[in-house]
Every structure is written in C-alpha cells, then in structure tokens.
Image (cartoon, helix red, strand yellow):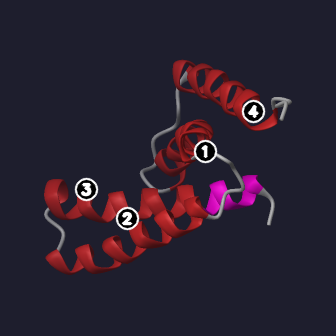
Amino acid sequence: MHPFLIYAGAAIAEIGGCFAFWSWWKAGASAYWLLPGLLSLAVFAFLLALVPSEAAGRAFAAYGGIYILASLGWMAAIEGLRPDRYDVAGAVICIAGAGMILLAPRGG
C-alpha cells in the first residue's frame, strides 16, 4: 500500500479518535463516545506502524504534515469552519516538509 494512503487512513483514524475524546470532554457527549474513540486510536497506531520506513521517528515526522492537512479538512467537513489563508499557508508549508522527509534520496 502506498505510504500516502496509509498516512491518510491513519489521519482519519487519529482525528476521529481524538474528536471522540474532545466531544466527551469538551462538548458533553456521552462517555460511550470513548469506546469508538479508543478503537479508532488503536487503528491509527496500527496503520502508522505499516509505513515503510527504517526509522519510526522519520515516519512520525512525515505524518505530521499529513495530520495537519487532514485536521483542517476535518474542521471544514465536520465542524463547518472554513480554514483561513493562514491555515492554508501553514498546511502547504507542512506538506512540503512532509514531502521532503518522505521523498528525499537517502544513501545506504
């Protein structure tokens, strides 16, 4: 599976899990939200472990850019708040950094 697809799935799972906790803690949702939230966070960890990388830190660092982009997408799609120009500019910078980490030629 392509790393970008793994990262995208991981981002959805992480944001969904964190949103479940956010909803319970900050928005007064039922504690039952924690069960799917925990499952979603476990799926996130599993998916992130599938990323082909010789170093966990590098895989996690590259994921950061994908997470930021996905979080802004979540904000727009689920929370109904449109990202502003600073959100978009920051996400572009982060995606460029993630791309550099993922696609850099590395010698052996």
Q: Closer to the N terminus: mark 3 or mark 1?
A: 3
Q: Amino acid at mark 1?
A: Ala
Decide: marks 3, 1 in contact (CB < 8 A)? no
Residue 96, which numbered label? Answer: none
Residue 22, which numbered label? Answer: 3
- Please tell me whether mark 4 or mark 3 is closer to you in this view: 4
The residue under label 4 is 99
Quadrant in which the N terminus appears: bottom right
Decide: marks 2, 4 in contact (CB < 8 A)? no
Please, which residue is most extreme toward the front here? 108
Tell me, yes or no, whether the highlighted magenta stretch contains residue 15: no
Q: Closer to the N terminus: mark 2 or mark 1?
A: 2
Q: Amino acid at mark 4?
A: Gly
Question: What x and y, as percent, mark residue 52?
Answer: 72, 56
Gap between marks 4 and 3, in whole Å?
29 Å
Residue 17, which numbered label? Answer: 2
Decide: marks 2, 3 in contact (CB < 8 A)? no
Magenta highlight range: 3-9
Q: Is residue 36 left or right of residue 1?
A: left
- Please tell me whether mark 2 or mark 3 is closer to you in this view: 2
Residue that appears at 27% across and 80% down: 35
SS at badge 1 = loop
Q: Amino acid at mark 3?
A: Trp
